């Protein structure tokens, strides 16, 4: 049996130790949905709270040396359907999908060749028979495959249905033209095509081999109905991003709080996307959680803020203990930009399933005035901003009244640092996962102590002789400040091993000595070093290492 | 103009100061959905974090003097659809609805008479003409109403469509029978009935007066589709409660964590109910947030735990600053119990819109073994529990092997303390709202300091002369520990007034004196007293009052 990949080991540990469970597992699961178990929810909350503290409670210091103006919001998942007309999601938020003409399976058009290469049984098998690298096709071998294994694996493939005709087209194209090597893609299309003149080259279904239909947009927004009847006027959508909720309340926030441009609105919450192929564990799921900010600023300053947030957000990820070499900034190419974006940069992480490449973790988009202008148009509400300070400044500079009037009212531009909270959980799991054959657990989670779900395991060495009382009292003292777990049972080795696996940085053991000298053993997860610490110094020990 | 009710004043303050906004307000709003603004989200997070800290991080001390075993969970909003077959929601989670035969309006059958009494224009108007307290009906007056105002207000009412026939039935029933006073309900049904012999007495639509159709169950669960096609096998539901997610993961939690019965699982998250009549601000909305616990225990101990949680949860609500006289425990009558419940008690709060009566805030239900048994049946997975400790105890007590085997494996019973987080926000808003004509704002929010969204407003008296520098430094020092707001502008009176309205317990002002003696003025919200405190004692001042 092949050794499990790093990703498989992480998924297995997550399930085994209560980080992440498949949702509805007792019913066989439901594709694209995950539950965060007792430890997963603590890890997720730690990331959530760090983001909220660093962005809303203690916003970063801006370029002028003063803290930024930032407020929070928690908008509804379901909003007025016009929101998604205005945002462009109803028109453009779709994946190109192709339906198999025989088995009805859907394939994402832009993933087809990937799928054939990585997860099509028949294609994989065929390639073991045959590699089309030369200008000559071994029709006999193909014919044999078509009539034997092909019948089982790809019953609807043209090559299997009618090998003679199919191969004759291929032979015409290739044989005797040694200068034109047939490429994999062309070869694959040929064996999926029976009536070349009538249909042109076809693409095969990765499952059954039949011809795929044309590419059609498939809407990613999940739909529902709010109200008594399932009529078109009651149709609503589960938000595919939290961002739009911020734009909808932009005006209320300007009108009812003390913020002035430039300012930001931050929000954490669930979003839904009916992903065609949810995959890579919690990386791409249908229900997920986001941490998004919209930063409203003067159009002339948007570029500066874009650069500010790039730096700031990179710094933040590193502050969670993510190693610099596993993070990367990647600018979107112009043809890759979303419909709303003037420029976008992704903060990418080197996930085990992308390595040595990187995958998306956070996107920082310069959305210009797209969203506010769109909502202004669709709602008929004025969403521009009157900049009193700018007015004053222009007046002082001796600008003409016309100029002052024209310049001090504008639609703010928006810089959006948007990241996935559930994706951040994945990053910390991947970052923390460490194989170590030298410890009993064989692997452990090297979380930054402040992000660890449990900060300390508190154990009586044995569950008697006065030790549990002391240990429980220590637990009661520490738990108001640090998430602790009191565990009086099992062998101490097993308890250490479990704490390693769940990434607990400190294990505190009350033993026979404790009763004599009021000291405990603190075992440090990463170094495995054990240290005697006086009972009344444990709080300080922990504070220095976790809250510093 | 009538004076605004307390509730109207609270709703208005919430909008004006950024606690709660109608969702999608720029598009005219969307019924039953609300957004939590910059202050609302802070208040909500404070409640959320208190609950999580007191239930999961520092669980209560149990009857045996040791802290309870409790773990957290964050399960998906969308689960396998079989979940809702098993839970009974698909079959029973419905409101009885009646559709108007003419205008198509839906009325909740059990709310009809309430609606007629409180929100039917035509009925209200008719009652001003006429009060059916005697055994004699003033047909002339009714006829006049039918032919004038009735035509406008209730065009489809039998009395309006055909007053002669309708009134003749009524007259037959009533006139000349002075001993049988006609009751309001009977009177109302009569004027809604044209063909008494054919149809029996009818009920009128509160909007247009036409006959209402029969009562039909209306499903409260919101539906969607996950997957490529909107086919029955892809149909999913937005959870109407977070509880089921806990039952689904009960087995994984027992298998992958160190909990032993009795133990609890706690979860906070959004739920959705397609309420027919969302109302009373955020009390009954279609999207809302819950804080639910399932406490798994031995069947013989369920009653004891039920009582334990009753006491514990009441205590908790009081710890948030809710006054005892505004809280009440109310046992459900047997005919009021949900399908899963053996007994239920509600913790009720005296909301302004229920006063002097009380309305639901939290339900504590004895669910018996209903849920686990149902999921066991529907999933085919064993969800019973093997109680090793009980086994040992029985062995010690000398029980027979058969008895030990029979008794140490069981399906745990469940006690569920389930409350609404968004409803808790409403309670703290109502509890805090205080009219006070003696202060400039005329009203203020008397939140318990630890629940207040902003703990301190930090002001330079004027925005110059070195004061902003000192004030901003103080803000930077305090903000890592307390949510603070730095506000350098407006007159100090306006700043105080705003902080009163948003319930900030302390306002700290840096003035001319500060520069000389390093002291600031701290103004206390409730007493309006001002006190000079040395700059280096401000942290202690706040800590003593908020984190004590």
Image (cartoon, coloured by chain):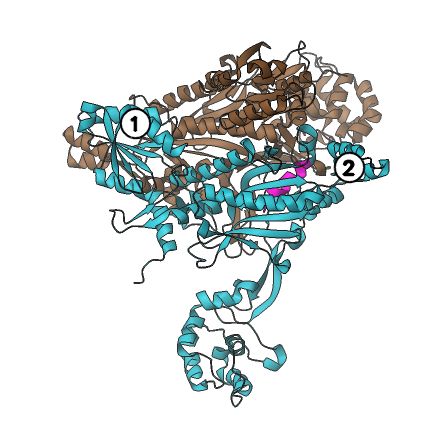
Chain colours: A cyan, B brown
Q: Measured from the top left, where is residue A539 in percent x and y?
A: 34, 27
Residue drawn at the location 20% of the way across and 38% of the way down: A491
Question: Which residue is situated farthest in the front direction here?
Answer: B516
Determine the main secondary structure of the stretch shown in magenta.
Answer: helix
What's the mark number on residue A74?
none
Identify which residue, A401 or B320, lies in the foreground. A401
Asked where in the image residue B102 lies, by quadrant, the reply is: top right
What's the mark number on residue A408?
2
Identify which residue, B367 or A438, lies in the foreground. A438
Whether residue B374 is visible to the viewer of this picture, yes or no, is: no
Identify the element where label 1 is drawn.
helix
What's the mark number on residue B300?
1
Query: What is the span of residues highlighted in magenta in the rendered image?
Result: A240-250
Q: CA distance from mark 1 to mark 2?
A: 72 Å
Q: Is residue B186 left or right of residue A74?
A: right
Whether residue A476 is visible to the viewer of this picture, yes or no, is: yes
């Amino acid at each position: 049996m092949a050794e499990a990949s790093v990703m498989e080991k992480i998924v297995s540990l997550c399930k085994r130790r209560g980080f992440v469970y498949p949702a509805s597992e007792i019913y066989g699961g439901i594709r694209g949905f995950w539950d965060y178990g007792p430890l997963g929810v603590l890890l997720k909350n730690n990331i959530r709270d760090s983001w909220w503290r660093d962005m809303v409670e203690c916003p970063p210091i801006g370029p002028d040396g003063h803290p930024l103006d930032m407020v929070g919001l928690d908008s509804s998942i379901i909003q007025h359907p016009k929101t998604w007309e205005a945002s462009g999601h109803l028109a453009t938020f779709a994946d190109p999908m192709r339906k198999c003409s025989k088995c009805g399976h859907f394939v994402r058009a832009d993933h087809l060749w990937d799928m054939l290469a990585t997860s099509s049984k028949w294609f994989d098998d065929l390639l073991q028979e045959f590699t089309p690298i030369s200008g000559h096709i071994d029709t006999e071998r193909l014919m044999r495959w078509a009539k034997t294994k092909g019948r089982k694996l790809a019953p609807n493939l043209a090559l299997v249905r009618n090998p003679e005709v199919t191969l004759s087209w291929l032979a015409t194209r290739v044989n005797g033209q040694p200068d034109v090597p047939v490429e994999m893609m062309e070869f694959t299309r040929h064996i999926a095509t029976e009536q070349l003149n009538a249909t042109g080259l076809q693409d095969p279904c990765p499952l059954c081999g039949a011809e795929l239909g044309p590419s059609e947009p498939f809407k990613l927004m999940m739909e529902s109905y709010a109200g008594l009847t399932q009529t078109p006027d009651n149709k609503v959508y589960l938000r595919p991003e939290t961002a739009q909720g911020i734009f909808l309340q932009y005006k209320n926030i300007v009108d009812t709080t003390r913020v002035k441009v430039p300012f930001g609105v931050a929000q954490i919450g669930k979003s839904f996307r009916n992903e065609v192929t949810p995959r890579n564990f919690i990386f791409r799921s249908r229900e997920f959680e986001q941490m998004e900010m919209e930063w409203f600023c003067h159009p002339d300053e948007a570029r500066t803020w874009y650069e500010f947030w790039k730096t700031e957000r990179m710094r933040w990820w590193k502050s969670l203990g993510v190693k610099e070499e596993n993070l990367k900034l990647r600018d979107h190419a112009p043809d890759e930009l979303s419909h709303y974006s003037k420029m976008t940069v992704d903060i990418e992480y080197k996930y085990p399933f992308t390595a040595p490449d990187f995958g998306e973790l956070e996107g920082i988009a310069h959305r210009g005035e797209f969203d506010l202008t769109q909502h202004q148009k669709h709602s008929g509400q004025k969403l521009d901003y009157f900049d009193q300070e700018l007015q004053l400044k222009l007046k002082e500079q001796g600008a003409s009244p016309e100029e002052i009037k024209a310049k001090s009212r504008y639609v703010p531009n928006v810089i959006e640092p948007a990241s996935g909270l559930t994706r951040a959980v994945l990053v910390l799991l991947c970052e923390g996962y460490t194989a170590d054959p030298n410890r009993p657990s064989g692997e452990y989670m090297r979380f930054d102590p402040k992000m660890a779900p449990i900060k300390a395991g508190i154990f009586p060495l044995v569950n008697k002789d006065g030790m549990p009382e002391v240990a429980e009292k220590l637990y009661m003292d520490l738990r108001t400040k640090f998430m602790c777990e009191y565990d009086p049972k099992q062998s101490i080795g097993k308890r250490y091993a479990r704490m390693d696996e769940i990434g607990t940085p400190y294990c505190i053991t009350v033993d026979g000595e404790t009763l004599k000298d009021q000291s405990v053993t603190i075992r440090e997860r990463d170094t495995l070093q054990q240290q005697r610490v006086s009972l009344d110094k444990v709080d300080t020990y922990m504070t220095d290492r976790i809250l510093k």
